[in-house]
Image (cartoon, rainbow, N blue to C red):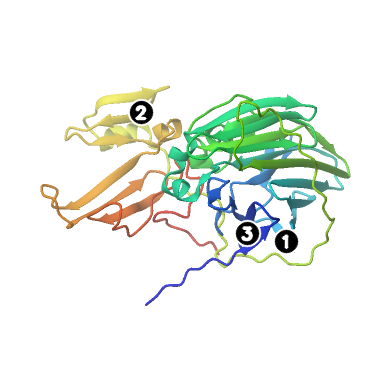
Amino acid sequence: MMIKNNLKLRTINNGGISFRFLETGDIYDVTYNDYQINLVKGNVMDGSLMNVYLRIKKDHGYISTPLIHKDILSGVSYLDHQVTYYGTFQGITYQIDLVIGKYQWDLHVSLDSNQEMEVDLFYGQDVAIQNKSSVLSSEAYTVQYIDYKVEQNKSGYVLSAKQNQGAPQFLQIGSYSKNIAYCTDGFQFFGNSYKLTQMPKALMEDQLQSVIKQYEFSYLTLQSEKVNLKKHASVSFYGYYKPEQYDADAIKIIDVQQLPFEKMTIDTPMKKSRFNHRTELLNGNDLSEEKIDALFNVKRHTEKSNGKTLSFFTDNHHHVVLKEKEKLVERPHGHLMVHGDLLHVSENVMATTNFMFGVFGSHIVLGNTSFNKFLGDIRNPLNVQKISGQRIYIKKD
């Protein structure tokens, strides 16, 4: 039996870069010829990492949401070179006009509300600017070769990324309205705590760090200035891609001009996914120190922090890691399980890897680990996308 799993994608191209969109309206990828500009392909469950986040100031802190996401979108409209998103969140009606040029895209965000509130917006852009096959082979390896540069103009910060492996690739993001802070890596924006909370760490803090971090999860982010929303407000961002040969040392800030666009009204109701996945995680309970002692009589090489046990070894050399340690580390804890003859070269060996944050099996292989794959590997150490590996979903009535 042939299993058909073809994505239904809509493509917009204005003579240069191509944007592809899922049925839900989420951005699937951004490409130019054989090069992928964004880092991670979107999917119908998790949406896209390339997004605009709306944050509202409340008495107890902040509440926030990605605006390009099927869970809150009410409609999407398409033109030849433009996509418009509509939705509501916490009494705010919003519209995003994504305008696509040859090597440029603009994001115009309009907010309307009958209530007075303080809000700000964050534009997050995952970055690969590398050959598609290289990106799909290893996102982390691709990102290790990206350099970042931060400069300023009248609107605030301008972020540039340059790919140093292979053909020169350059990406710049900025804003037409005022921005006040930035970050360059997903570990700064999402944070280790995202594995448990599914809430970007940066959105719970007053301001982005405005520090360049060059790690393995390229995610350029700009934070707008605070907006006192009374009736109407608007904020605009842009992205600019330069694929041709260029003198990287000579490039400073590229003066990007706004693309013309049309103000549209909703004409296509939002198509909801048949699998209406929510980003709520079910986490296990913490083990008390008394419970740990009852389960393990002998603990060796115990690792503790602030009086809480992080990990230890048992008498039979098993390494036990608790949730407290998983919160602190950038690398997820996994367990490789192997069955078969490991003493001789043979195809009669099966292996799989599970991970502590809810992946019950990934990279299931038989014999050759490169060719005989039955299930893919996880693509991100922070569990940002949950479409890979074996997962358990709970249906709520």
Element at badge 3? strand
The numbered disc on residue 143 is none
Q: Earlier in the sequence, mark 2 or mark 3?
A: 3
Toward the top, the furthest residue is 306
Q: Earlier in the sequence, mark 3 or mark 1?
A: 3
Q: Position of residue 13 (x, y in %)?
A: 67, 57
Q: Which residue is mark 2?
A: 309
Mark 3 and mark 1: span between their CA atoms? 11 Å
Mark 2 and mark 3: span between their CA atoms? 46 Å
Q: Position of residue 143 (x, y in %)?
A: 49, 37
Image depth: mark 3 or mark 1 in front: 3
Q: Which residue is mark 1?
A: 76
Q: Is residue 191 left or right of residue 392?
A: right
Image point (73%, 50%), residue name: 101
Q: Which residue is mark 3?
A: 21
Element at badge 1? strand
Based on the displayed image, in which of its 4 quarters is residue 287 positioned? top left
Q: Earlier in the sequence, mark 1 or mark 2?
A: 1
